[in-house]
Image (cartoon, rainbow, N blue to C red):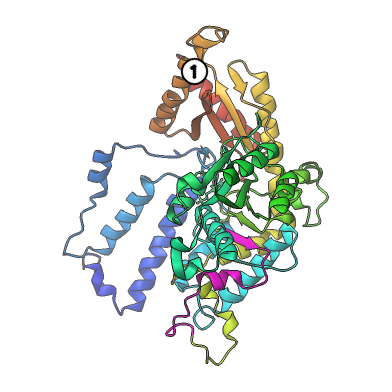
């Protein structure tokens, strides 16, 4: 096939299909993986939207294009995309690249099946069950249920729906009119998906009662008690508490034992939004690493939860998306709550055990395979390898904290418990001016300016946010397993360089 022929002629041409894909894989390995993980390359190639539209030539036309044009388009897409695997990408709670997980993602994409029946996903039905079993074991459960969801926000939403259904099974058929006014409880540091979920499920955001957190960002159990009484006094029925293990900004851990006590007293469903649960904290992988011993207590009580949402796509570098909802339930609650028994898909007279057709547990029909990337990575690293990564991340976060304390112009927001390191960069003109009335206002302007500079240069990406009364500060998250102390030094050096004239 001549390169100038339109690509549509590939249909039914296995040799050309293979040739194209080898070329595309080559581009992926060179441009997205090698360059994308090289500190010598930019982490992003910033363009204004109008310019980027021009460069991408987005318009879809009636004429197909040649192979060479298509390959060039692949390169262009990669060139202007942010390299989240890059050692200078600190912007999100996910970063870095695990090659085995990527291999799993590529296989998943290539096989393109749906995780609903044993008939069309025999390998992945069995695999998902095994992976979920393993994750449940880390939580401390030898039984239960679960499912991979399209992200942590959806996992949280599922937990709310299950808790509601368990108490009011009628609502599946009769809807909201069968329900009293409900109340759920979470801390002011919770992820915003709790409110979104409440809105989506028809509970309304008003049903989310916000519990106070202490100065470290941990839910205050006494205030939870108070909020429950308050809700009851207002005629609402409390049904769920969502605790967070590793809050999004500060990386705080709610006191699960105390919260579980409150839930037990009031008969409430306890959900733990544990997107950054480092499995090492469970010390379930047999390694005797000091850090895991030190930090294990942060999750004490998690085994008392009714449900746990956990995102291996964050702290474990499993790749987007990989989010598990784990349940202690053994009553088939997931399926009873969401099942609809589509007779064209879930025939009951199949020639194999129809319990293997797990697709009716979810509100989706087609569902991505999210277990393979985690399974393959786990097979390659072993539990011990993953645990080492966790400990390395803790150690590196600790190194960064000590460096921040040593350097002029850097100020910690608080001592971190986890791998979120929150700090201010105080530029030369503001140093020693803490007492001046407009200090906070001026400090708040620093992070956005530095962010613009780093993105436009493509030197690194790190997130910032205001938080309560605190002016904008940077949130560094040490997740990428390839990071070294040199990268931590780079982060601080680069902020100094970018902000020396401020
Ligand atoms: C990231 C995060 C979520 C949301 O997960 P998504 O997969 O992005 O939907 C929920 N809760 C916490 C604590 C998180 O950090």
Q: Residue at x 40, y 31 (%)?
A: 457
Q: Give residue 131's position: percent from left, percent from top.
A: 65, 66
Q: Badge 1 local density, few (<14 within 10 Å), some, or many (20+)?
A: some
Secondary structure under tag 1 reads: helix
Nearer to the camera, 317 or 353? 353
Query: Image quadrant for the C terminus?
Result: top left
Residue 332 is one of the magenta-drawn residues: yes
Residue 251: name its quadrant: top right
* Residue 418 in view: yes
Q: Is residue 321 above or below residue 494?
A: below
Left/right of residue 498 with respect to residue 481 in the rendered view:
left
Q: Residue at x 60, y 87 (%)?
A: 353
* Residue 84 in view: no
Q: Is residue 219 above or below residue 444?
A: below
Q: Give residue 188's position: percent from left, percent from top.
A: 56, 37
Query: Image quadrant for the N terminus?
Result: bottom left
Q: Which residue is mark 1?
A: 443
Left/right of residue 450 with respect to residue 185 in the rendered view:
left
Residue 484 is one of the magenta-drawn residues: no
Q: Residue at x 67, y 19 (%)?
A: 406
Left/right of residue 227 with respect to residue 117 in the rendered view:
right
Nearer to the camera, 26 or 458? 458
Image: magenta residue range: 323-346
Q: Give residue 219's position: percent from left, percent from top.
A: 65, 38
Q: Is residue 452 above or below residue 348?
A: above
Nearer to the camera, 348 or 42? 348
């Amino acid at each position: 096939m001549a390169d100038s022929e339109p690509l549509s002629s590939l249909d039914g041409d296995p040799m050309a299909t293979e040739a194209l894909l080898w070329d595309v894989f080559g581009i992926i390995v060179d441009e997205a993986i090698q360059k994308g993980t090289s500190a010598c390359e930019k982490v992003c190639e910033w363009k204004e939207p109008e310019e980027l539209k021009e460069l991408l030539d987005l318009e879809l036309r009636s004429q197909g294009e040649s192979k060479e044009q298509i390959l060039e388009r692949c390169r262009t897409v990669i060139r202007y995309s942010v390299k989240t695997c890059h050692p200078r990408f600190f912007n999100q709670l996910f970063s870095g690249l695990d090659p085995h997980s990527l291999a799993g993602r590529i296989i998943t994409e290539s096989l393109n099946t749906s995780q609903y029946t044993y008939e069309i996903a025999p390998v992945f039905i069995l695999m998902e069950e095994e992976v979920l079993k393993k994750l449940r074991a880390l939580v401390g459960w030898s039984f239960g249920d679960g499912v991979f969801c399209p992200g942590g926000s959806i996992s949280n939403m599922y937990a709310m729906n299950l808790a509601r259904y368990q108490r009011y099974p009628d609502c599946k058929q009769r809807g909201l009119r069968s329900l009293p006014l409900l109340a759920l409880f979470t801390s002011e540091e919770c992820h915003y998906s709790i409110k979104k979920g409440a809105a989506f499920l028809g509970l309304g955001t008003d049903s989310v009662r916000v519990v106070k957190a202490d100065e470290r960002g941990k839910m205050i159990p006494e205030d939870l008690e108070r909020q429950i009484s308050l809700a009851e006094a207002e005629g609402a029925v409390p049904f769920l508490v969502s605790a967070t293990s590793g809050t999004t900004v500060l990386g705080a851990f709610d006191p699960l034992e105390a919260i579980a006590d409150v839930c037990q007293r009031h008969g409430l469903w306890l959900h733990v939004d544990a997107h950054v649960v480092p499995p090492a904290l469970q010390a379930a992988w047999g390694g005797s690493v000091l850090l895991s011993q030190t930090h294990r207590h942060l999750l004490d009580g998690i085994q008392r939860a009714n449900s746990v949402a956990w995102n291996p796509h964050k702290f474990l570098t499993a790749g987007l998306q990989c989010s598990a909802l784990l349940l202690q339930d053994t009553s088939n609650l997931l399926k009873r709550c969401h099942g609809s028994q589509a007779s064209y898909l879930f025939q009951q007279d199949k020639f194999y055990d129809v319990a293997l057709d797990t697709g009716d547990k979810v509100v989706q029909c087609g569902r991505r395979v999210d277990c393979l990337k985690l399974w393959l990575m786990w097979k390659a690293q072993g539990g011990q390898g993953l645990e080492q990564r966790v400990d390395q991340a803790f150690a590196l976060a600790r190194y960064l904290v000590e460096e921040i304390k040593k350097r002029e112009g850097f100020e910690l927001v608080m001592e971190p418990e986890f791998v979120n390191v929150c700090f201010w960069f105080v530029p030369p003109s503001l140093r020693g001016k803490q007492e001046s009335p407009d200090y906070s206002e001026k400090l708040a302007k620093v992070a956005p300016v530095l962010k613009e500079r780093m993105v436009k240069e493509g030197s690194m990406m790190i997130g910032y946010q205001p938080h309560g009364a605190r002016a904008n500060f940077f949130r560094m998250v040490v997740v990428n397993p390839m990071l070294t102390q040199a990268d931590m030094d780079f982060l601080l050096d680069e902020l100094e360089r970018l902000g020396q004239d401020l």
